[in-house]
Amino acid sequence: MTSSGEPRRRRRADAERSRAAILDAAVRLLRQRPDAGMEAIAAAAGVTRQTVYAHFSSRDALLVAAVDRITEDAVAAMDAAALDEGPARAALLRFLDASWRSFEDNAPLLQAAPAGTPGDGERARHEPVAERLARLVERGQRAGEFAPGLPPRWLVAMTVALGHAAGDEVGSGRMTSTEAETALRTTVLRVLGAVEGPPGSHDRPDRA
C-alpha cells in the first residue's frame, strides 16, 4: 500500500457513493415526477447539477442507469421469492407477483426512460430475469407441471412479451393495473400449459 494509492481509493469510494446517492434520488423522484430535470434530481440528491453531469453525461444516460437500478431491485425481489423452491406453478406466480410489483412501483419512471434499442446493454439488463424464468420453466416441464414440447426460452420470450403488453395496456389507460395483472397471470398460466386457478384463489401470493 502506498501513500499515493490511499487518496485515489478514497476519491474512488467517494465518487461511488456520490453516484449511488444520485441514482437513489433519481429513482425516488422520477417515480413521482417522471418529467423531473437534472437540477431537481441534483437537489434531491443533495449535490450540484455539475456533480450529476460528472457522473451522467445526459438525462437519458441517468434514466438508463435508473432503469438498471430498478431492474437489479426486481431481480433481488425474485431471488427473495425463492423461485427454485416448492411447486413450479406456485413459484411462477411468485415470479409474476414480484415482477408486477416492480412495474407498479416504477411505471412512471419506466415510461419516461428512453426507448430501449437492441444491443448488448439491453440484453444484459434482461438476461438475469430471463435466466431465472428459464430455470423455473425447465423445472416445471421436468415435473410435469408445465406442458412439454416447446423450448423453455421461447416460453420465456412469450412471458416477457406478455408482461410488456400488460404494462402497455395500463400505460395507455385501456386497463387498470388490477385488470392487467389478472389477465397477465391467466394468460401466462395458459401459455405454459399450467392448470388455471379461479380468480382470487389461494394461488395469489399474499401481499404485505
Image: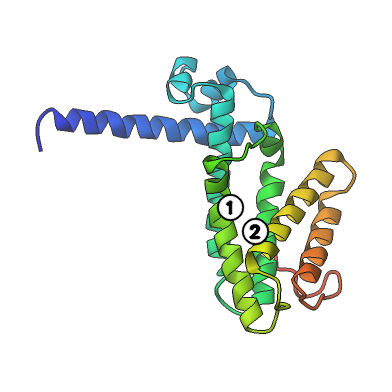
User: Seen in the image, is 154 located left or right of residue 191?
Assistant: left
Assign the N terminus to one quadrant of the image: top left
Q: Quadrant of the C terminus?
A: bottom right
Q: Residue at x 67, y 46 (%)?
A: 105
Q: Position of residue 32 (x, y in %)?
A: 68, 33
Question: Taking 23 as reference, is 34 left or right?
Answer: right
What percent of the width, then of the height, locates residue 148?
70, 78
Image height of 165 relative to 48, above or below: below
Residue 207 appearing in the image: no
Check disc 2 and report the residue beneath it. 98
Q: Looking at this rendering, what residue extends furthest in the right direction?
A: 174
Determine which quarter of the picture holds residue 185: bottom right
Which quadrant of the figure has residue 132?
A: bottom right
Write the residue at 63% across / 63% down. 153
The residue located at (53%, 35%) in the rendering is 65
Color encoding of the figure = rainbow
- Give the residue number, with chain letter if any, for mark 1: 74
Q: Residues within 10 Å of mark 2 (few under 14, many from 20)?
A: many
Tell which circle, 1 or 2, labels the residue nearer the N-terminal end. 1
Task: Please say if the residues under marks 1 and 2 sit with CB atoms less than 8 Å apart.
Answer: yes
In the image, residue 185 sits, relative to residue 193, either above or below, namely above
Q: Tell me which residue sits at (54%, 63%) in the image.
A: 80
Q: Residues within 10 Å of mark 1 (few under 14, many from 20)?
A: many
**Residue type for callout 2:** Ala
Left or right of 146 in this view: 199 = right
Residue 50 appears in view: yes
Front residue (pair 203, 72): 72
Q: Secondary structure at mark 2?
A: helix
- Residue extending furthest left? 2
Task: Kindly identify the amino acid type of the residue bearing the numbered disc 1.
Answer: Ala
- The spot of residue 205 in percent (x, y) is 70, 68
Q: CA distance from mark 1 to mark 2?
A: 7 Å
